[in-house]
Amino acid sequence: MSWTLPVETIFNGDTGEDDYVITLPDDLLKQSGWKCGDYLQWIDRGDGSFELKKFEPPAPSAQHQPSPSAESPSKDSFPSR
């Protein structure tokens, strides 16, 4: 399936810069099976067009999770009075 969608320019008052938005129509979402919250990868086709593909982001690994002691200090972290 192939779609041509307009790019909307929206001024971002927080950053003072323009943001660029593409609204995905309901019929495209239905046909592709995409839904709100899905992760889409932008692929530059090199001819001025882009391809969007749904992907699953990698699950965070255990080594990137903060340890319980790093999240909140234990009562032994503070000197007693």
Image: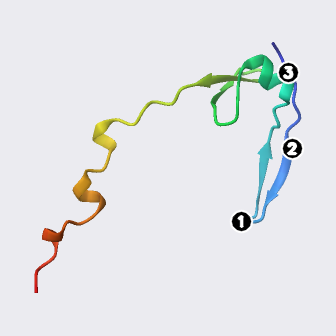
Labels in figure, total: 3
Most distant residue in the top direction: 1
In the figure, is residue 51 to the left or right of 1? left
Measured as percent of width and height from the top left, residue 9 is found at 85, 48
Looking at the image, which residue is at 79% across and 21% down? Answer: 30
Q: Residues within 10 Å of mark 2 (few under 14, many from 20)?
A: few
Q: Is residue 57 above or below residue 18?
A: above
Looking at this view, is 25 or 74 the one in front? Answer: 74
Query: Contact, CB < 8 Å: mark 2 with mark 1?
Result: no
The residue indicated by pointer 3 is 3
* Residue 37 visible to an observer of this rendering: yes
Q: Circle 1 sits in a helix, a strand or a loop, which is it?
A: loop
Looking at this view, is 44 or 37 the one in front? Answer: 37
The amino acid on which the numbered mark 1 sits, given as a three-letter code, is: Asp
Most distant residue in the bottom direction: 81
The residue indicated by pointer 2 is 8
The residue indicated by pointer 1 is 14
Measured as percent of width and height from the top left, residue 52 is found at 70, 24
Q: Quadrant of residue 61?
A: top left
Looking at the image, which residue is at 82% across and 23% down? Answer: 28
Looking at the image, which residue is at 83% across and 37% down? Answer: 23
Q: Quadrant of residue 62?
A: top left
Q: Circle 2 sits in a helix, a strand or a loop, which is it?
A: strand
* Among numbered discs 3 and 2, the one appearing first in the sequence: 3
The amino acid on which the numbered mark 3 sits, given as a three-letter code, is: Trp
Distance of label 1 from label 3 (alpha carbons): 31 Å
Measured as percent of width and height from the top left, residue 14 is found at 71, 65
